[in-house]
Amino acid sequence: VRLRDAPSPNHDARPEGAPIDVLVLHYTGMPDEAAALARLTDPAAEVSAHYLVSEDGAVTRLVAEARRAWHAGVSQWRGHSGLNGRSIGIEVVNPGHDWGYRDFPALQLGALSALCRDILARHPIPARNVVAHSDIAPDRKQDPGELFDWKGLARDGVGLWPGPWQGAAPSAAEAPALLARIGYRTDLPLPVLLRAFQRHWRPARVDGVADAETLARLAAVAGAASPPA
Ligand SMILES: [Zn+2]
């Protein structure tokens, strides 16, 4: 991965003894890359990420991995909260839902995949902890959204993308327990959680409804994230 540096002042020390075991993917959600880079390096904005991946595949390092970047905000995954302390954050340039959400170019996804594989080689990050901002903040965030190629990343060894569910179809009543097994917080309305889940693992329809396909997908992802002992 060829890196250029654009140091952001927006970082601090990681908590003592915290492992780096979560990788959080975002979109920038700004009209263009220049605006996003300006914000991610503006001390007044108090936001950052470790890396920014351009639409042409350029990778910019903003914060050293040893430091805590400020990208996740109020967040929760697998019982941990405040995930900046234990995560690496990558901003993927895309205008997002507010400014003209569009496909992520192949060059960008290729560079992102290589960057993620580098990071996974350096830190003990399990596949189930490669997450969207929307997974860890389902009530606030939609990024990187349903156009993001999670399946392609998983083909490269980055994140979870199980095949079709072969077992018995779960009932709708089992949805909260399956979401919890994957890692979602469960103290939010079920449709909010289901939309976050669908955005990542069933992007064809993001409607918050526990239909048969969503339930089967939930079972498949839960089985891959937390296999029965
Ligand atoms: Zn984000």
Image (cartoon, rainbow, N blue to C red):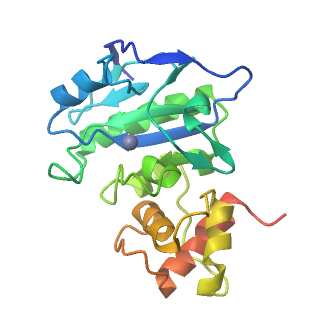
Q: Quadrant of ligand 1?
A: top left
Percent across and percent down for residue 168 are 66, 87
Q: What residue lies at 72% left-to-right and 19% top-to-bottom?
A: 16
Can the viewer see residue 224 in this picture?
Answer: no
Vertical comparison of 84 with 215: above or below: above
User: Foreground residue, 77 or 120?
Assistant: 77
User: Image check: 143 left or right of 176?
Assistant: left
On-image quarter of the C terminus: bottom right
Q: What residue lies at 53% left-to-right and 16% top-to-bottom?
A: 12
Percent across and percent down for residue 220 are 60, 71
User: Foreground residue, 30 or 103?
Assistant: 30
User: Foreground residue, 106 or 222?
Assistant: 222
Percent across and percent down for residue 171 are 62, 87
User: Image check: 60 left or right of 101?
Assistant: right
Q: What residue lies at 54% left-to-right and 64% top-to-bottom?
A: 188
On-image quarter of the N terminus: top left
Percent across and percent down for residue 44 are 31, 19
